[in-house]
Structure formats: C-alpha cells, structure tokens
Amino acid sequence: MTVPAVVVAASGGGSNLQAIIDAIAAGSLNLRIALVISDQPSCGAVQRAIIHAIPVCAIPYPRRATAAQRIAWEEQAMSVVHCFAPDLILLSGFMRILSSETLSQTSVPMLNQHPALLPDDGGDDVVLPDGRVIPALRGAHVVRDALTRGLTVTGCTIHRVVPQVDRGPVIARATVEIDPADTEATLHARIRLVEQRLLLDTLHQRVW
Ligand code: GAR
C-alpha cells in the first residue's frame, strides 16, 4: 500500500504535529510527513520538525500584511508545498486564512483542525447528541469564546477547507465538557488531547 504524503501547515506549538510524528514512529499510522510549512519561524511546530529531521519551510508573514503581501506569501508557500507533491494538506493550528484564489488553485485535499464544534450544514447552531443546541463558534478565539458565552460543552472538529471560513464539510468531531473552573489554557489543553485522537483516527482511516 502506498504511503500518503502529508504537508502540515502550523503556526503554534505543534502538539498535533507531534501526535502524528509519534504515531508514525510507533507504527500505528502509515503516513509520511513530507513537509511542515509555517508562517511563524520560531514556533514550536517548526522546532519539532527540525528535531525530527522533517523538511520544514518557514516563511515569515509580514506584520499588518497588505493584500499584495498576503497574495505573495500564499503564492510562495503553495509553490513550496506543491514541490512536495502531497496527497493531503493539513492545517494544524495554522492561523492564516487562505484566499479563495489560492484554494481554487490546488486540487490537493485540505483539512483544518478547529478547536470547537461545527455543524454539518454550515449553519450557526450545533445540535449535540443529547439534543442540546449550542452556537457554532468560528474564528481565531473559539476556546475563549466558549468560556465567555458560558457554554457547558465545546469540542473540536476536523473539516474540509472551503473559501467560507470554518464552514467546510465536517469529517469528524468530538465533544469536550467544560469545567466551571476551566481557564482558556486548561480547556484548550483538554481539547488538544481529544483532537489529537480525532486527528489520528481521521488520518488512519484516510477520510479526506
Ligand atoms: C489546535 O487546538 C487547533 O484546533 C487550533 O490550534 C491548535 C493548535 O495546537 N486551530 C485553530 O485555532 C485554527 N483556527 P497545536 O499547535 O498544539 O497543535
């Protein structure tokens, strides 16, 4: 069986990247990380790639990027990504929104990890398995938003990337109960543990 090549795009600590690295090393995931690409040269994900001798490309993203700089960054990044001929591009804590032009120029499947629950229909509500309805949280601060809104449950979602941000078809999701004593850090730490399992299952089943 061929070993799929994945490019991981990351901006943060890279705990999900590490989960993939560890699963491949343990023989429980038949995958090859072809490249780690980042907009944050000093982030943890880049360091993890270096430590594990994974090809890495970090292109600093300009502060207050203009539209032209944003397009230039995406063109550079995607030209590098395509050199590695990936079967999958995984946005794993990648904190940039790719333009619809860039998305339309790649035929490689692209998945995003989102640290909150998203619905199947791209709508504004999520119906939980027990019938409770909670708001779909979108954007860059959804762990904080779950606490601010006083939710008692949140979770994580893996979805296909489409031009409409955080609205692509859902591949998998899992719930995480919120403890009244949770801070953003403690809640996100628990979400990360759940989403790592969800990610490894998704990659193992090759549903992309
Ligand atoms: C994950 O929780 C992921 O869902 C989230 O960033 C974290 C990355 O953690 N993604 C987003 O917020 C995308 N908008 P990690 O760097 O430890 O893997």
Image (cartoon, rainbow, N blue to C red):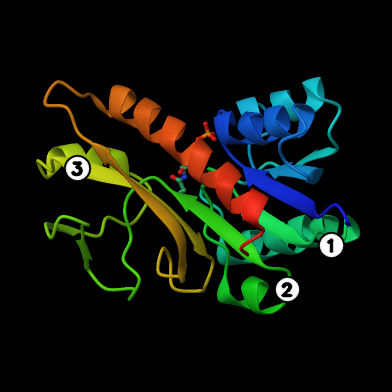
Three-letter code for the amino acid on which mark 3 is drawn? Val
Q: Position of residue 166 (x, y in %)?
A: 41, 63
Is 156 drawn above or below residue 97 in the view shown?
A: above
Q: Which mark is residue 106?
A: 2
Three-letter code for the amino acid on which mark 1 is drawn? His
Decide if residue 135 is on the left or right side of residue 60: left
Q: Position of residue 52 (x, y in %)?
A: 81, 24
Do the CB atoms of the residues marked 2 and 3 lie less than 8 Å apart? Answer: no
Residue under numbered circle 1:
82
- In the structure shown, which secondary structural element does the residue marked by tag 2 occupy? loop
Q: Is mark 3 within 8 Å of ligand 1?
A: no
- 27 or 82: nearer the viewer: 27
Quadrant of the snapshot with the C terminus: bottom right
Q: Position of residue 35 (x, y in %)?
A: 80, 44
- In the structure shown, which secondary structural element does the residue marked by tag 3 occupy? strand
Q: Is mark 2 within 8 Å of ligand 1?
A: no
Q: Which mark is residue 98?
A: none
Decide if residue 23 is on the left or right side of residue 182: right
Of the two numbered discs 3 and 1 in the rendering, the one whose residue sits closer to the viewer: 3
At horizontal 17% and vertical 37% (from top left) the residue drawn is: 147
Circle 1: is it few (<14), some (14-19), or many (20+) Cα within 10 Å? some
Q: Earlier in the sequence, mark 2 or mark 1?
A: 1
Do the CB atoms of the residues marked 2 and 1 lie less than 8 Å apart? Answer: yes
At horizontal 67% and vertical 58% (from top left) the residue drawn is: 206
Q: Position of residue 71 (x, y in %)?
A: 66, 66
At horizontal 63% and vertical 63% (from top left) the residue drawn is: 110
Q: CA distance from mark 2 to mark 1?
A: 9 Å
Is 50 drawn above or below residue 158 in the view shown?
A: above
Residue under numbered circle 3:
153
Q: CA distance from mark 2 to mark 3?
A: 35 Å
